[in-house]
Image (cartoon, grey):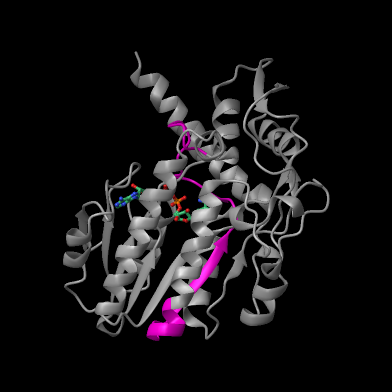
Amino acid sequence: MKDNKEILVCGAGGFIGSHLVERLKREGFWVRGVDLKFPEFGKSVADDFVIGDLRNQEFCQKIFNRKYSQVYQLAADMGGAGYIFTGENDADVMYNSALINLNILSGCKEAKVERVFYSSSACIYPLHNQVDSNNPLCSEESAYPASPDSEYGWEKLFSERLYLSFIRNHGLPVRVARLHNVFGPECNYNDGKEKAPAALCRKVAEAKDGGEIEIWGDGNQTRSFLFIDECLEGVTRLMESDFAGPVNIGSEEMISINDLARMIIEISGKKISIKNIPGPTGVRGRNSDNKLIYEKLGWQPDYALRKGIEKTYQWILAQVKQNSASAF
Ligand code: NAD
């Protein structure tokens, strides 16, 4: 075991958390996962997996009964555009995630955890800097004056400030990353919380050759997408560094949603047309700005989007085939 170090991963039943647990286990750590649910697409490899609600202060206190060298806080009430931009889940998103963050921070402080990771988001960046799809501004200092376009973004901004205040006032060694659109195999793809790459892979996988898929908005909105392995590499490097952040962990390979769909269609080998329909889209343009991460960590993501999309499409295609086979 790696120096007998014990690690807590909050949100270990989710997409990033379950991949992180696998990575930490491969590196030789003892890992406890905690979540409302087990991972959906395979058994967790955590040494201990506790099912419980991190909004509950008593439960949260109990999981701090071990001496953790690191805590990764990934638990949040979140989802893709269909979940966070419709307005229907605003109260839950803010209330649930804020409670989780307050409870976990209090546990980390009492237990004197040696290092704490908090997953903030690119959604904290102001709307007014993301109105030009070709020229979005997402450098870290551009976060203020603040004006995120969703309550999800506002809660993340509040919580990253909360975590940073615990460095200043309680000496808690916190690291904060603003993650940009992470994707990969074993992500949500059909439960209403899926993000654009997974939703598009599913639509293409389900479509017949010669068919059509629907895309929300005019499809000219731009984003960048970060493959899960690169996300974990960035998070690990940040945790090992002396830099607290907040820092972007994202790809700078910006693409329009229509072009992303075309890429997936090409990978599928099918002939499929695109129909743009009204729907929640979020900001017009967003891209990671990696100057700061490169300056502080001497590293930045460079994995080609297409390689990650190929892996993700193959995984989602297999799920879609399995689902349709079990429907008979
Ligand atoms: P996810 O939804 O797959 O995982 C979050 C997990 O938190 C879920 O398994 C959920 O059950 C758990 N959770 C929610 N409420 C809980 C509660 N009350 N008690 C215990 N567990 C609870 O999301 P993800 O994609 O793995 O993202 C992980 C973190 O990274 C989140 O904080 C998210 O906001 C942040 N983030 C993700 C992305 C991305 O593109 N995936 C981008 C920016 C930021």
Residue 16 location in percent, x, y?
44, 55
Residue 11 location in percent, x, y?
35, 55
Residue 18 location in percent, x, y?
37, 55
Q: Which residues are magenta?
A: 166-194
Where is 101 relative to 172, above or below?
Answer: above
Point 50% across, 62% down: residue: 158
From the viewer's side, name the closer residue of 58 and 114: 58
In the drawing, does residue 230 fall left or right of residue 253? left
Task: Choose top left, top right, bottom left or bottom right for residue 102.
Answer: bottom left
Residue 125 location in percent, x, y?
65, 57
The quadrant of the picture occupied by the C terminus is top left
Task: Choose top left, top right, bottom left or bottom right for residue 204.
Answer: top right
Q: Is residue 182 magenta?
A: yes
Task: Choose top left, top right, bottom left or bottom right for residue 280.
Answer: top right
Where is 228 relative to 92, above or below?
Answer: below
Where is 156 relative to 170, above or below?
Answer: above
The quadrant of the picture occupied by the N terminus is bottom left
From the viewer's side, name the closer residue of 91 and 220: 91
Point 67% across, 24% down: residue: 278
From the viewer's side, name the closer residue of 88 and 113: 88
From the viewer's side, name the closer residue of 309 and 110: 110
> Is residue 47 at all visible to an observer of this figure?
yes
